[in-house]
Image: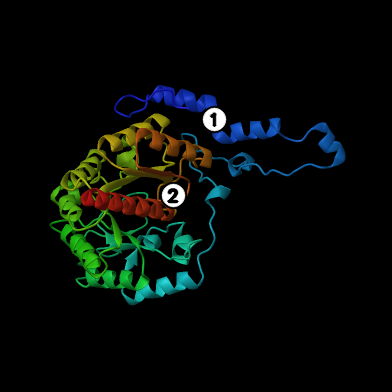
Amino acid sequence: MLNRISSRGTLCHRNVTQSFEACVGKRFGSALVDLKERMSNGPRLGDFISGDIPSAPLPASLSYTGKLKREEGEDERLRLPPWLKTKIPGGKNYNKLKTSLRELKLNTVCEEARCPNIGECWGGGESGTATATIMLLGDTCTRGCKFCSVKTSRNPPPPDPNEPINTAKALADWGLDYVVLTTVDRDDLPDGGAAHLAATIMEIKKRNPSLLVECLTGDFRGDLNGPATVAVSGLEVYAHNIETVERLQKFVRDPRAGYKQSLAVLRQAKRTKPSLLTKSSIMLGHGETDAEILKTMQDLREADVDCVTLGQYMQPTKRHLKVVEYVTPEKFEYWGDVGKKLGFVYAASGPLVRSSYRAGEFYIAALLKSRAEDSKLRVSQ
């Protein structure tokens, strides 16, 4: 599909776009190719006469007749397509986890950001193991990004000094093998909360050294001592989200955030500890172009980012940015393939994929364990 990859691992945008349009169509992606193949291999005249016609449902994006993109100047909200509708959360695991979090006064980004995957993660999904992304430094952010539903304030309450111990205790009780920590931005703190994050990770590792830890941090106002402090605290995966393409940063994120600033944070984490896996996430649906998405992915690879996730932006409340476009599952699949060809160790791309993505956690955990075993083997030799 992709005609040319340069020696540095980057893709030619013109070839990408032409190849994509030629192979999968401008709107429906590989579903059109699949439909054509099914038609060529489908029932014959004799099947219709005999009444022996197998049923083959269309992909959701082809059977959906609603509007997927707002045109310039339109203000009406788009209806949610069927592939983005999820079950109402509930069940034994869900209720147990919620009770545990409340007892220990812990916050989760799952609740604060109204994640659509909360039912699957807290309920345990197919694996039966419930997971949650713990949000550190309180539930109130000093930033006001236009896509995020987390509470905001210029002067939020001070961090809970017991949070590192309470977090470590909760995770020990849950018996997990992989955990994701995230944080609100704390521009009111001298170090942006870096020391608090590092203390929490060290406390977790003290209680359970084998627990794999991923931490999704803010940008520390561009102070590179912040990512350096967190990078050496004992975690395995350092994540920081670039969120959107460069052109849309000022419309989507708080003015104190920035494209180049986010890339610098990711570079600093890898520079401080090269063995870390670094990770970032891109939201689609704000009106970005294919060329801009590709450039963002290339910039992340040039910053030595190992893992990338791409997911659909969903408007959390009427006060937040409206969705410009609902990207089809087929187009997300295409971007996942692009990510692999660009050289990302892991590229997850789908409408409901989030930076703290359950399936991604299992994959990255397996990758980290495999690397650890290879390292032991090399030492023994």
Percent of width and height locating residue 366: 37, 53
The residue lying at 87 percent from left, 37 percent from top is 49
**Residue 28 in view of the camera:** no
Quadrant hosting residue 236: bottom left
Quadrant hosting residue 156: bottom left
- The reply to whether callout 1 and callout 2 are in contact (CB within 8 Å) is no
| 373 horizontally vs 333: left or right | left
User: Which amino acid type is shown beneath numbered disc 1?
Assistant: Val
User: Which amino acid type is shown beneath numbered disc 2?
Assistant: Val
| Mark earlier in primary sequence (1, 2) | 1
In the foreground, 218 or 347: 347
The residue lying at 25 percent from left, 66 percent from top is 204
Helix, strand or loop at mark 1: helix
The residue lying at 33 percent from left, 51 percent from top is 370
In the foreground, 301 or 83: 301
The residue lying at 27 percent from left, 65 percent from top is 138
**Residue 380 in view of the camera:** yes
Total tally of numbered discs in the picture: 2
Percent of width and height locating residue 183: 27, 58
In the foreground, 355 or 82: 355
Q: Residues within 10 Å of mark 2 (few under 14, many from 20)?
A: many
The residue carrying mark 2 is 353
Q: Is residue 269 depicted above or below 210 in this figure? A: above
Helix, strand or loop at mark 2: loop
| 194 horizontally vs 374: left or right | left
* Cα–Cα gap, marks 1 and 2: 22 Å
The residue carrying mark 1 is 24
Label at residue 199: none
Q: Residues within 10 Å of mark 1 (few under 14, many from 20)?
A: some
Percent of width and height locating residue 137: 24, 63
